[in-house]
């Protein structure tokens, strides 16, 4: 079976940490969408690693890691990731396989991303500027260059043709983006050489063969459901399907092969970049979450916006993904609040609603909150459900009843070990 682990909010829920914890139960760990806009943090044995393209199972000897066809790869960032892991003595040739159908982010894709954002001005998406949007545009526009193309003779000609087109587009945008293409290309082609030393596979064949051999696969989502290109807070979203269906197209596995769908969420909410965020806080409480939770983007270092848990949005994500088990992260960050709040409906233009409306704007959606008693206990050293404060268990019980899915794990710190089964 293929199990999925998906972020249910606006990303950074702690997917990397939990995939690492789960890897011992799986033969294969695979990314199926997104690219180096993702930043997945793993902390164990006193070391911290942030992965952008490489699946979070890479530190375990037993699992094979696969970058699926739905992913977009920046060779330069990919090379840096591999270089950063030099101390771990990982055999990347056998432990990290790459789909021939994954698309390549070119240097000019990043420039186009920057130009597009500059042109949007105040209305910018707040992109990570990794070239994600322009690369997926070339994929769906049928112009993209794929990993498998690197094995063909004419790929450099195709690179030149596409780059030329991008430079024309850049001119067309008419905004001032500073760049040195020669330097960018040198770095790019150098990284391509490293990429070519890895193993490229027909990944859909690989996965289906693995399934026939009763191997277990965990698909690691990137971003979160509210950043999904179809179901997120469009246009403030990313350019891929981050939700469950994206795993089928991003790996080449059929829907009837999907087993568990693990939905992961923070005990509160964060968002990095622009776009609507009904429960966002601008007060002391928000600052406390930001400080205690150390809420800075793992990819860009930007401060993450913080707010209370939005159960209306969570229920929406649970529904879109068919979540079967929930995982609650960063419960420790809420220790110390006298009162917690969770949004349980929206006041939408004067009417109380319990679903995500088509158009969420600051002046048409006001969250309606339910309050909960907080807990003072430090959770970071706890290992057992029995030690958890009653008020935390009440908070969890309310969430389970609201979204109608059980919470199976609660995370009480960033380390692999700070993970409690319920
Ligand atoms: P991802 O993109 O979903 O993998 O999440 P990120 O790595 O971008 O962000 C999650 C952040 O929270 C990282 O800095 C993690 O080390 C940290 N983290 C994960 N789980 C917990 C937790 O339970 N408590 C605390 N305090 N930090 C956590
Ligand atoms: P992980 O996998 C949080 C956000 C950006 C921006 C929007 C579009 O670590 O959870 P893009 O670079 O895709 O053009 O940006 O999406 N974004 C993320 N926010 N976590 C991520 O990934 C994100 N990847 C993209 O901030 O608002
Ligand atoms: Mg992240």
Image (tube, rainbow, N blue to C red):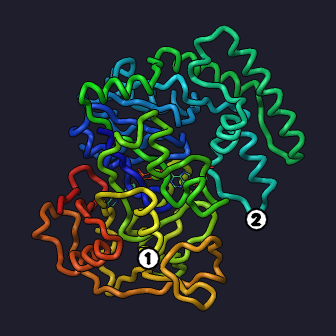
Q: Most extreme residue toward the bottom, as rendered?
A: 350
Q: Is residue 394 left or right of residue 104?
A: left
Q: State the image quarter where residue 366 is shown.
A: bottom right
Residue position marked by numbered label 2 in the rendering: 122
Q: Considering only order in the chain, which callout, 1 or 2, is on the residue closer to the N terminus?
A: 2
Residue at the image point whose x is 33% and y is 49% from the top: 17
Q: State the image quarter where residue 343 is shown.
A: bottom left
Q: What crowding class fits label 2: few (fewer than 14 Cα within 10 Å), some (14-19), or many (20 or more)?
A: few
Residue 14 is situated, as x and y percent measured from the top left of the image, at: 38, 54
Residue at the image point whose x is 52% and y is 20% from the top: 195
- Compared with 406, 109 (above or below) is above
Report helix, strand or loop for mark 1.
loop
Tag shown at residue 308: 1
The Cα–Cα distance between marks 2 and 1, rounded to whole angstroms, is 25 Å
Q: State the image quarter where residue 7 is shown.
A: bottom left
The foreground one among 43 and 147 is 147
Q: Is mark 1 within 8 Å of ligand 1?
A: no
Residue 30 is situated, as x and y percent measured from the top left of the image, at: 39, 36
For the question of whether residue 265 can be seen, the reply is yes
Report helix, strand or loop for mark 2.
helix
Residue 111 is situated, as x and y percent measured from the top left of the image, at: 74, 40
Residue at the image point whose x is 82% and y is 30% from the top: 165
């Amino acid at each position: 079976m293929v199990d999925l682990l998906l972020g249910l909010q606006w990303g950074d829920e702690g997917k990397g940490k939990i995939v690492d914890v789960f890897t011992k139960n799986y033969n294969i760990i695979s990314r199926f969408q997104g690219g180096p806009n993702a930043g997945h943090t793993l902390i164990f044995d006193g070391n911290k690693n942030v992965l952008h393209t490489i699946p979070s199972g890479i530190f375990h000897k037993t699992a094979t890691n696969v970058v699926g066809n739905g992913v977009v790869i920046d060779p330069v960032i990919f090379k840096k990731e591999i270089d950063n892991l030099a101390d771990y003595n990982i055999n990347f040739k056998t432990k990290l396989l790459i789909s021939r159908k994954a698309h390549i982010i070119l240097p000019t894709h990043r420039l186009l991303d920057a130009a597009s954002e500059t042109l949007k001005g105040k209305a910018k998406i707040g992109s990570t500027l990794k070239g994600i949007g322009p690369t997926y545009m070339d994929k769906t526009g049928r112009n993209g260059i794929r990993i498998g193309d690197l094995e063909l003779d004419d790929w450099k000609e195709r690179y030149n043709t596409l780059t030329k087109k991008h430079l024309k587009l850049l001119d067309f945008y008419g905004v001032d983006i500073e760049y040195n293409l020669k330097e960018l290309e040198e770095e790019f082609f150098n990284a391509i050489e490293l990429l070519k030393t890895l193993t490229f596979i027909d990944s859909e064949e690989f996965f289906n063969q693995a399934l026939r051999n009763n191997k277990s696969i965990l698909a690691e989502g990137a971003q979160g459901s509210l950043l999904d290109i179809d179901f997120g807070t469009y246009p403030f979203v990313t350019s891929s399907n981050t939700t469950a269906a994206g795993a089928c197209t991003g790996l080449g596995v059929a829907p009837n092969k999907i087993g568990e769908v693990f939905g992961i969420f923070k005990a509160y909410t964060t968002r990095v970049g622009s776009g609507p965020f009904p429960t966002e806080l601008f007060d002391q409480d928000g600052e406390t979450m930001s400080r205690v939770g150390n809420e800075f983007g793992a990819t860009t270092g930007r401060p993450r916006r913080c707010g209370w848990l939005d159960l209306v949005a969570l229920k929406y994500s649970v529904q879109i993904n068919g979540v079967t088990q929930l995982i609650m992260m960063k419960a420790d960050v809420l220790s110390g609040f006298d009162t917690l709040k969770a949004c349980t409906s929206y006041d939408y233009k004067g009417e109380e609603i319990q679903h995500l409306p088509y158009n969420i704007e600051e002046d048409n959606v006001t969250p309606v909150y339910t309050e909960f008693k907080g807990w003072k206990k430090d959770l970071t050293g706890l290992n057992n459900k029995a030690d958890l404060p009653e008020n935390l268990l009440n908070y969890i019980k309310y969430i389970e009843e609201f979204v109608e899915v059980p919470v199976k794990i609660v995370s009480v710190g960033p380390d692999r070990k700070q993970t409690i089964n319920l």
